[in-house]
Amino acid sequence: MNLHEYQAKELLRKYEIQTPYGQVAETLNEVNALAKDIKNPVVLKAQIHAGGRGKSGGVKVVKSKDEALEFSSKLLGKNLVTYQNQPSGQPVHKILFEETENIINELYFSILIDREEEKVCLVVSSAGGMEIEEISKKSPDLILKEFCNPITGLMDYQTRELANSLKFSADLAGKFNKFAKSAYRLFTENNLSLLEINPLVINDANDFVALDCKMSIDDNALYKQKKLSELRDWSQDDSKEAEAHHLPPGMFGSTIR
């Protein structure tokens, strides 16, 4: 089960992981209310369960209410098609408004389950902003990995090794350790199958900020994550799968004799 970006960032903040300040609009009236006092550029992001939004017109920096309304009117209630959800795309029901950040550096960061190693794996790269598939093809040497022992979890020496490879200062290495430990705790406590922050940026205050986030929860663990399971947006899933899920229990009777 996937979460929308704005939902994932709410969870990040609960674990003291910094994100840009943002608000969500569902109607043009709400867009108008959020945009009426724009003083600095803000980023508008269509909320769908697919990557490639920026390349498909689903993300835009705007500087005025008129720009915000023009962008939102083209997307709200319509399908946004990206390379990940062709050919039909997915419906846009919400637009995320976010403050912009003064970015010093961009990184790629993710935590996932490595099925071959049967361990949780941290993946970090200095090539932030690129899709991980692009990085692996063009610059595989930039991909750094640390596998976590299921008993001991993520260790300080592992975050230090990553920080050293990324040439972080001592201050930044300490902040990275805190960030990575929080992300690992979020991942394990919420039964995630994927946590991807791309880009993870370093801002002008020398802090780590999750600029974009994808979060997937293990479907087999949803019974343990009732609150998260209630956040599911069925409009983003395959229509047949959604229809099948909502059929009354026992509709087809039992096949057991």
Image (cartoon, rainbow, N blue to C red):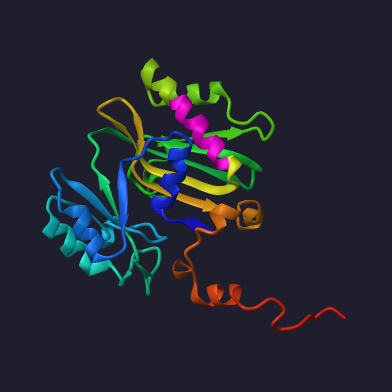
- Magenta region includes residue 111: no
Q: Is residue 136 visible?
A: no
Q: Is residue 40 rendered to the left or right of residue 95? A: left
* Relative image position of residue 146 (x, y in whole percent): 54, 33
Tell me what residue is drawn at x 49 percent, y 72 percent.
238
Tell me what residue is drawn at x 19 percent, y 59 percent.
32
Q: Nearer the viewer, residue 240 or 160?
A: 240
Q: Is residue 36 visible?
A: yes
Q: Is residue 156 rendered to the left or right of residue 76? A: right
Tell me what residue is drawn at x 31 percent, y 46 percent.
22
Q: Is residue 99 rendered to the left or right of residue 241? A: left
* Quadrant, the N terminus: bottom right
Q: Nearer the viewer, residue 251 or 169?
A: 251
**Magenta stretch, residue numbers:** 176-187
Q: Is residue 162 above or below residue 32?
A: above
* Relative image position of residue 104 (x, y in whole percent): 25, 31
* Relative image position of residue 247 (x, y in whole percent): 62, 78
In the displayed orientation, state which residue is furthest to the top: 170
Q: Nearer the viewer, residue 57 or 33?
A: 33
Q: How many marks?
A: 0
* Relative image position of residue 255 (x, y in whole percent): 80, 81
Q: Is residue 44 above or below residue 127?
A: below
Q: Quadrant of residue 88?
A: bottom left
In the displayed orientation, state which residue is furthest to the bottom: 252
* Quadrant, the C terminus: bottom right
Magenta stretch secondary structure, dominant:
helix
